[in-house]
Image (cartoon, helix red, strand yellow):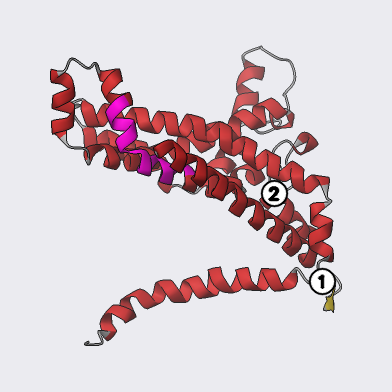
Amino acid sequence: MKFDKWGYLFIAPFFIAYFIFGLYPAINTFRLAFFQYDMNMPTNNFVGLQYVIRALQDPLVYHGIFNAIKYWAVGTVFVQFTAILVAAVFTFFKIRGTHFFKSIFYLPSVVSSAVVATIFSLFMGYPAGFVNTLIVESGFVDEPIYLLGNPVIIFCLVIFISWWMGYGGTSITAGAGMTSISDELYESAKIDGASFPQIFRKITIPLIWPVLTYMWMTSLIYGLQAFDIQFMLTDSSGGPNGVAQTISMYIYKHGFEVGNVGYASGVSIVFFIVIVVLSIIMLTLLQRREK
């Protein structure tokens, strides 16, 4: 077997970056969870499972996990529904400028979510943001309103930004699955008198179920790690009553603001276990549905 050194050289940058910025930090996080490491007073005392047990007893950990699940669940419903609808329209109907529209829909996916959230934060800012300026000068209110102090507005903003940035890329994935289905199946169904909703429900959805499974699994993993949108809108506090504080923001707060890296690492281990458990549960349910 000939050793092709050039192939290994081409893939080497990815693996080097992965080991430096992915694998090593993960291993080090696991190690730090067992030591009392405070950035303000550096120590290296072994504490065993103390931080992990503390994290399991911390109600704010469960609050952060619940918030992450809540935003993921609501956001995913809108993203997946819109993505499948857009993919179906472009797959089954002849539309002029299809590639142009696909590019427009996909464009938000390549923009940094932190940048988008920052723009919306300035847009909704107090007291001189665009919205406040508009409603004050229009006479709807006499004084500016602290919009980002309203839990409902924060929740809707996070969902909207997640939807706007997510459905384009997801529709490309769903569309790829739909175009892989043989036209003969659709023609046979039409000959048998099946309507478009029946064809979509009985043929398209079952045949792209592996693609949908992939979409749901990846959305779960990334959704539970939600950080940048919520953080840029509310900072690490998560807004009033921590309405937007996810578990990732709680880890960041303890690790970089409080400086208790050991406890932040302990919370990270608990969070990792939660992601694994929820992923297994979802994958099991989706596979049962597929069968």
Query: Helix, strand or loop at disc 1?
Result: loop
Residue labelled with disc 2: 247
Residue 280 position in % (x across, y down): 55, 50
Q: Residues within 10 Å of mark 1 (few under 14, many from 20)?
A: few
Q: Amino acid at mark 1?
A: Gly
**For residue 107, which quarter of the picture?**
top left
Question: Is 257 displayed left or right of 222 in the figure?
Answer: right
Question: 111 or 288, which is in the foreground?
Answer: 288
Mark 1 to mark 2: distance in Å?
22 Å
Residue 109 position in % (x across, y down): 42, 44
Taking the view exactly as shown, the residue that stands out farthest to the bottom is 2
Question: 75 or 119, which is in the foreground?
Answer: 75
Q: Residue at x 42, y 46 (%)?
A: 214
Q: What secondary structure is the stretch in magenta mostly built from?
A: helix
Q: Residue at x 46, y 77 (%)?
A: 16
* Numbered range of the magenta stretch: 202-216
Query: Helix, strand or loop at disc 2?
Result: helix
Question: Is 156 displayed left or right of 195 in the figure?
Answer: right
For discs 1 and 2, the disc positioned in front in the rendered view: 1
Please tell me whether residue 236 belongs to the stretch shown in magenta. no
Establish if 97 lies above or below 106.
above
**For residue 130, which quarter of the picture?**
top right
**Looking at the image, can residue 114 be seen?**
no
Task: Give me the disc on residue 290.
Answer: none
Residue labelled with disc 1: 48
Establish if 141 lies above or below 205.
above
Residue 19 position in % (x across, y down): 51, 74
Question: Is 66 displayed left or right of 15 in the figure?
Answer: right
Q: Amino acid at mark 2?
A: Ile
Q: Earlier in the sequence, mark 1 or mark 2?
A: 1
